Image (spheres, rainbow, N blue to C red):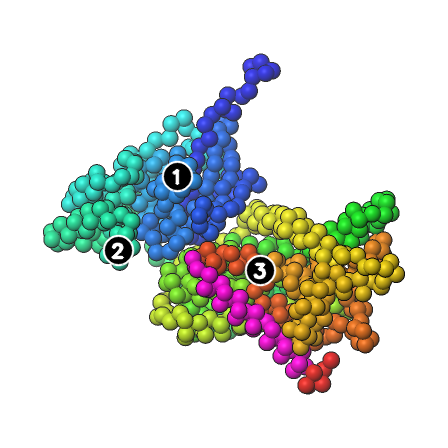
Amino acid sequence: MSAVEEPPQLHRKLRHIAIAGNPNCGKSTIFNALTGLRQKVGNYPGVTVERKVGRFRGIHGEPMSLLDLPGSYSLQVRAPDEAVSRDVLLGREAGMPPLDAVIAVVDASNLERNLYLVAQLLDLNLPMVVVLNMVDMAEKAGIHIDVEALEAELGVPVIPVVATQGKGLLALKTALSRESLPQPAHRPPMPELIEREVRLLAEKLPAKPRVAFPEALLLLTLHDRVLEDLAEHNPETVDAVHAAQERLRAAGIDPLCALVEARYEWINTVYANTVRKPAKRKGLSFSDRMDRFLTHRIWGWVVFLGAMTLMFLSIFTLAQIPMDWIDAGIHALAGWLGHHLPPSQVRDLLVDGVIPGVGGVLIFLPQIMILYFFLGLLEDSGYMARAAFMMDRFMSMVGLHGKSFIPLLSSFACAIPGIMAARTVENRQDRIATILVAPLMSCSARIPVYTLMIAVLLPGTSALVKAGMMLGLYLLGIVTAFLVAWFFKKTFLKSETSMLLLELPPYRKPSLRSVALCMKERAGLFVTRAGTVILSLSILLWALVTYPKPATPDTSRADAMAQSYAGRMGRVIEPAIRPLGYDWKIGVGLISSFAAREVFVGTMAIVYNIDGAEKDAGSPTLRDTMRSELRPDGTPVFTPLVCIGLMVFYVLAMQCIGTVAVVHRETNSWRWPVIQIALLTTLAWVGAFAVFQGGHLLGFH
C-alpha cells in the first residue's frame, strides 16, 4: 500500500445495527462494552424517548453504528417506548436509516421467557445475531444450553457472552463482520389459516416487501379499540384487517390467542431441544435468600434508607477534596485574570460574571458524579427492581402503579429522563399523574442549591448531620409527591390502579465499566450545560446586574445593584417574596433559576461578587459572603429560617423550563404544564411561608 492510499475498510459502508431485548437482559451492558466512549444520547425524531447511538468497528475495521432500543417484551406494544422499538425495527421511524442487522440479547438464565421476542424478531426477516448473555449465571444455576442446537432451531448465529466481563464480544464482532449477513434460515411456525390471511393482508399494505409480512401479522393481532384509533388515517387498511379477523373468527380462530399459543408451543419445543436443567434443588437460591432480607417489610426499608444515607454522606465527604481543588482553581483563575487584564468591561465580565457564574456550578461536579455512581451500582446490581417492588404498596395507596417508581427514581437524577421513562406506564391517567409529580423528586440540579444552603446554615457541623438534612429534603419531596399524586388520582385523573407485574432480575456483580460510562455521560451533560446554558445566563445576569451604570461614580455597590435591571426585577417580585423572608437579591436568584435550578448558585456568586474586587485563593467563599450579608437594619439576611425556607422552596418548586417543555411534549397539551407550574409554585410558596412565619410564631429566628 502506498503512503497516499487509505486503508480499504475506510471506504466500506456504515452498517446500521439495532440491539433489542427484554428489560434486565444486559442489553445496555453489551451496548456500552461495544461502543465504549463513542456514544451519543439524544431523542428519537419527534418523540421524547431517549435514543443512545454508538460507533464501533468490526474485526476488520468495518464501521458500525449501534442503536440501543428501549427494552421490550413484545412487539405487540402496551407502552409508548415499546412503540419506538417496534417502529424502528419495522422501518417506520422517520429520520432513521434502514437497519442492516439486529442483535437480539437474551438472558441465558431465563431463555424460555426471552424467546417470545426472538420469535417476533425472526418474523422481521432481518439479518440477526442472538447474544446469549449471562451464561455464567446460567451455569451457576446448573442450566446448560446447547448453543449449536439452539442455532439450528433459530436459524441464526448464537453467541454466548458474559458482557460484564467482556467475554464473547470478539465472537460477536466476528459474526457482525461477515461480508454478507445472512437472513434467518426459517421463522417460527403459525397456524395455516393465520399465515394465509397474513399473506393476503400483506399484499394490500403499502409497506416495503421486507416488512409487509410482519406489519400484517401485527395488524391482524390488534384489538378493536386500537384499530379504531388507526381507522382515521388508514381506513382501507383497517377494513382489510377487520375482514381478515372476521374470516378467522368464523373459522373458530382468535388471531391473537392462536398466534400466542403457536409461538409458545414453538418456544417449548426449542427449549426442550436445547436446554438441560438440573433436578430441582432443595432450599432457596442466592437471589431468593437475599430477597427475604432486602425486601423484608422492616429490614428492607432499613437497608434502603441506609443506602440513601451512605450516598448522601459520600456526597459531603468524598466529594469535598475535588470540590476544594475546583474551588481553588476557580479563585486562582479569577485572580490571575484580575491581575493581568487591564481594567475594562471585558475583565469585569470574566472576573465578576463568567467565572463566578459557571465556576459556582462546576464546583458541584464531583457530587453529581458520586450520585450517578451510586445510582449506577444500584441499577446494575439488580437492586433497583427490589426498590420498586417495596414501593409498590405505597404507590398503590396513592393510586399510582408500581411501574411509576422507576420514572420517579430516574427523576432523582433529572426530571426530564424521568418524565420520558413514564412512557413505560400503560395507563394514561397513571402516566400523567407520574409526569406531574416527577419534578418533586429532588434532581441532581438541586444538589448545588441544597449544598450551598446547608453550608450557610450549618458551617461547622459534621458530614453526617449534613447528610441527614439532605436525606430529609429528599424525603420531603417524596412524601409531597405521593400526596399530590393522591390528590390528582382522586380528582382529575381517576382510574383503577392496576396490578404490578414486575420481573425481579437475579443479583449480579455490577459492571464498573458501565457505571463509569454512565458517570462520564452524565458528567459530560452537566459540563455541557454549564458551558452553554449557564454560561449564557451568567453573561446575561452580569449585564443585568451591571447596567445601567449609576449616574455618579461614588454610588455605593448596594445602591448601584438596586438601580440595575436585575435590581429592578427583584424589586418587582419583592412584595410577593417578602413574607418568605427573602429580599430582592434572592428574588433575582429565583427568577434566573427558572431556566435551571443550579443557576441560583451562579446568580448568588455574581450578585455578591459584582464589586469588581480582584480575587485570589484567599478570597471569601460564597458561603462566607452569604452568611455575612446584612439587611439595611443590620440583621442577617440568611437566617436559619430563610435558609431552610429556601431549601423547602427548591424541593417543591418547578423551576425548570426544560421540564416544562418535555411535559408539554409528553402530554401533547399546555393544560398539564400550566396546572403543574401553578400547583408546584403555590406549594413552594406555602411551604417556605410556613417555615418562615411558623418559625417566628414559635420563637425561632
Residue kind at label 1, given as amino acid type: Val
Q: Residue drawn 11% across and 53% down?
A: 250
Give the image quarter of residue 623: bottom right
Expressed as whole percent of the image width and height from the top left, the position of residue 249 reads: 14, 53
| Quadrant of the snapshot with the N terminus | top right
Q: Main secondary structure of the magenta part?
A: helix
Question: Which comes before the other along the chain, label 1 or label 3?
Answer: 1
Give the image quarter of residue 478: bottom right
Mark 1 nearby-residue class (10 Å; few <14, some 14–19, many ≥20): many
Q: Nearer the viewer, residue 354 or 116?
A: 354
Question: Which comes before the other along the chain, label 1 or label 2?
Answer: 1
Q: Is residue 383 left or right of residue 147?
A: right
Q: Read off the residue under disc 3.
A: 656
Residue kind at label 3, given as amino acid type: Cys
Counting the numbered discs, the total is 3
Gap between marks 1 and 3 measured at Cα: 38 Å
Q: Secondary structure at mark 2?
A: helix
Membership of 687 in magenta stretch: yes
Res 228 label? 2
Gap between marks 1 and 2 measured at Cα: 31 Å
Q: Read off the residue under disc 1.
A: 102
